[in-house]
Image: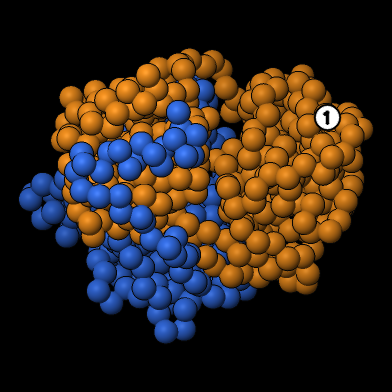
Amino acid sequence: MILVLVDHDRGELDQLSLRALTAARKLGQDVEAVVIGSEGAALAGIVGEYGAKTLHVASHANITDYTPMATGRALKDLVEKLKPAAVLAAGSPRGNEQLAHLAAFLDLPMAAECSEITLGSPHHVLRARWAGNLIESANVHADLLIATVLAFSTEPETANGGAATVAQFEPGLQPQDYAVKVLSRDAGESKGGVTLVDAKVIVSGGRGVGGPDGFGQIEELATLLGGTVGCSRVVTSSGWRPHAEQVGQTGTKVAPDLYIAAGISGAMQHIAGMKNSKTIVVINTDPEAPILGYADYAIIGDLHQVIPALTTAIRQAKG
Amino acid sequence: MDVLVCLKRVPLAGGTLILTPDSRDIETKHLGFGISPHEENAVEAGVQLVEQMGGTLTLLTLGPSDAEEQLRSQLAIGATRAVLIETDGQEWDPQGTAAALVDAINAEETKFDLIIFGAESADSAGYQIHIRVAHALNRPIITNVKSMKIENGVAVCDRVVAAGREHYEVALPAIVTVRDGLNIPRYPSVPGRMQARKKPVDMKKAEPRVPKLEKVVLALAPSKSTGAEILGNGPDAVPALVEVLKKIGAF
């Protein structure tokens, strides 16, 4: 049996977890899912649709929001009871963190961000390194495989299953497991509206934008396409835009339907954050810029001329 | 306030990676070395805390003896001293690395109030060493921190998530991992560099363990093989792009 940690944020499903469920099904064993926190029980329908027969729900008075060490303890309790062959989660910051707590509790290896998993003795994985620019072939020497599934490496496919059977359990938490917990939240740097992770369209600007003022036209185009603004690391380091908008290994990893990169040459760490986008359009003065190696379409030219012309043309086409 | 920052020497790879003939490592003959991006923020945070509150900032790394170069350049930023756990140059797996760090931390006379890691390494990105260290030292850990203050023995931290900011507070001693954006790392001053040459770097040895996460071989990730379709030059190419955007249903 493969146990998949399905992450949720106060009851709202993490979409990458559906990909982890899909990847788990490909291992040819029964799949069961686990959610942490009682609100997660509402996900029994969708989790079942993606092939999990049972949804284990960890409920505890001290699990009221994201408490990663408590997740680790709950998973440990469940692993000891169910003896799965593997525990998987999405290769997201939260997925990686929660499984690392499990691995630390059990003192077992963990393979993060795997694009391919083969169970065996030893287990074998392909995992992303160097911001996804290298693929490591690795053996995992342990009975239980603990691994996260590289974001966007597997397309989510439903199994047309019925709702999963809910099985409640109360993990035996220690006080230190919930010493670190979310005390409050605010919208912070994000301006409300579409967040980078959820955006279907992202228009990103880099060094070529030239300064904070240049982002006006980027914003206009993003709004026109119903999307949001992203940027490269140099832009946030220069203080032109807030860090919440940074796309890349040190920012947010995204995979929208359309990614327009304007004035971004394509440092490895930026590519890592956007190369899984469905369609990538590059606007750059340099025909040799590394980002062209990842683009579907490109215009060679100055974004300060191309983007206003594009905005006008889209407005006209929309009528 | 005694702070420890853990670092990793990594090659400074710009655009394209090249593998060694045995495909077990990246070719570093023509590359410089530095530390992972988030770790510069970790050192800066440590320096600022010691400036404000007094105390010491210790740096700790596991790596080849050449990693002394990275320790010296961070000592020049304002750290007090450094510890280098010397390996044979082979990469250690996360469990082995974490165990060696824990042994070194436990061997220190100073009981660090705060241990800071970068959120992820540039090269191996295993997302676990900091958590294993926290478990072994029985300390709370907050990850991916983008702003941090220490007030009355409590670390007050924010973590940026898709929906905004999450606010955390935890009593010291604690461990945090920090992200790029936490602060703006300073450049070393000339006097800082001079002083760094004389600051103590303790060299330690640790025995490698048999890796449980065993690297077999590396391969370059494929980029899009077809290459970009060039729609044209400048604003004249805009109509062609509008057609593409229509075709993919962007508006």
Residue at 45% x, 45% y: name it.
A279
Question: Relative to residue B132, is residue A136 depicted above or below?
Answer: below
Residue B223 shown left or right of residue A73 in the figure = left
Residue at 82% x, 44% y: name it.
A159
Of residue B8 and residue B82, the one placed in the foreground of this image is B8
Of residue B118 and residue B54, the one placed in the foreground of this image is B118
Residue that mark 1 sits on = A44
Q: Amino acid at mark 1?
A: Ala
Residue A306 position within the rendered picture, expressed as x and y whole percent measured from the top left? 22, 37
Residue A27 shown left or right of residue A300 in the figure = right
* Callout 1 crowding tier (Cα within 10 Å): few <14, some 14–19, many ≥20: many
Q: Which chain is orange?
A: A
Is residue B45 something that shows in the picture? Answer: no
Q: Which chain is blue?
A: B
Quadrant for the C terminus of chain A, please: top left
Residue A202 position within the rendered picture, expressed as x and y whole percent measured from the top left? 41, 34
Of residue A214 and residue A64, the one placed in the foreground of this image is A214
Residue at 22% x, 56% y: name it.
A287
Residue at 30% x, 58% y: name it.
A290
